[in-house]
Image (cartoon, grey):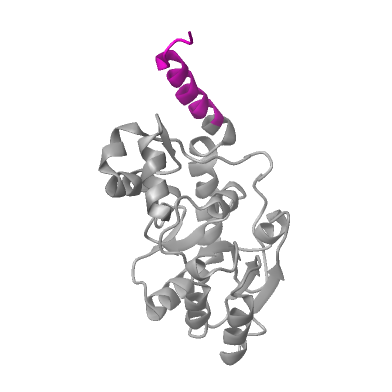
Amino acid sequence: RCGEYRHWALDHTTRIAAISSYVAAFVASVAPEAAGKIEVVLNGIDMARFAPVPSPASGPFTFAAVGRLDPVKRLQIAIAAMAQTPDVHLNIVGDGGERGMLQGLVRRHGLQARYHFLGHLPDPRAAIAGCDALLNTTRAEGLPLAVLEGAAMGRPTLGFAGGGMPEVVQDQKTGWLVRDDTTEGWATSLQQAGANRALAASYGRQARAWVENRFDIDTMCKHYGLVYSALIETAPAAR
């Protein structure tokens, strides 16, 4: 019945704001009749709050995965890949129903010294500041806010080349996009990303520059304002 309500809502909506081009294309594919109503309004974040901070200068190369521990996040593939990738560490920020299963996988692979479950953090900035890069193993994010927050703080992201991720991460410029969605493919990408801390820091600086104007919260609010203004102008006059 969820699909029925979705189509009802689309039929009775004047404009549809999609948070990324990927989401816009998805909505148009499931409801072609609504395609003319869709406008992309990119999600934005507070660039001042998520200000750049220097990357760690020493210690193991560390990734951070920020988000709820849910099957859609597919963190099990990261655990299996890290078992084939020596030296790199992963901090997991978030909580959810998958936590026990993921901790069991970490123990099974003998990765306790390289995996750190930090639980839910009301403010993820300290965890982002303490990592060299973000890791996102989801196949189809609409627009990954945690990746935007990491980019704003000067951190590149290693993520899957699907969903809205390519709209945020420029491959080999502001991060790395994984196209081989196998354990071996992820392991290779983890190893390549973690092998050059200076290059990762360079990607992080470029990531900040890339998101600064495109995904700023003020830009988002101005775009929504234009959408609302257009709706008001075209609305029938009240009697």
Residue 47 sits in which quadrant?
top right
Compared with 126, 137 (above or below) is below
Query: Foreground residue, 124 or 172?
Result: 124
Counting from the top left corner in percent of width and height, residue 223 is at 49, 28
The residue stretch that appears in magenta:
221-239
Query: Foreground residue, 15 or 174?
Result: 15
Residue 230 sits in which quadrant?
top left
The residue at the point 48 percent across, 67 percent down is 72
Q: Classify the position of the N terminus by image quarter.
A: bottom left
Counting from the top left corner in percent of width and height, residue 43 is at 51, 41
Q: How many marks?
A: 0
Compared across the picture, whether 42 is left or right of 59 comes to left
Residue 14 sits in which quadrant?
top left
Counting from the top left corner in percent of width and height, residue 91 is at 64, 70
Tell me, yes or no, whether the highlighted magenta stretch contains residue 225.
yes
Tell me, yes or no, whether the highlighted magenta stretch contains residue 189.
no
Compared with 154, 37 (above or below) is above
Counting from the top left corner in percent of width and height, residue 129 is at 68, 57
Compared with 83, 131 (above or below) is above
Query: Foreground residue, 44 or 202?
Result: 44
The residue at the point 34 percent across, 46 percent down is 27
Compared across the picture, whether 31 is left or right of 1 comes to left
Query: Foreground residue, 39 or 199?
Result: 39
Helix, strand or loop for the magenta stretch, by majority: helix
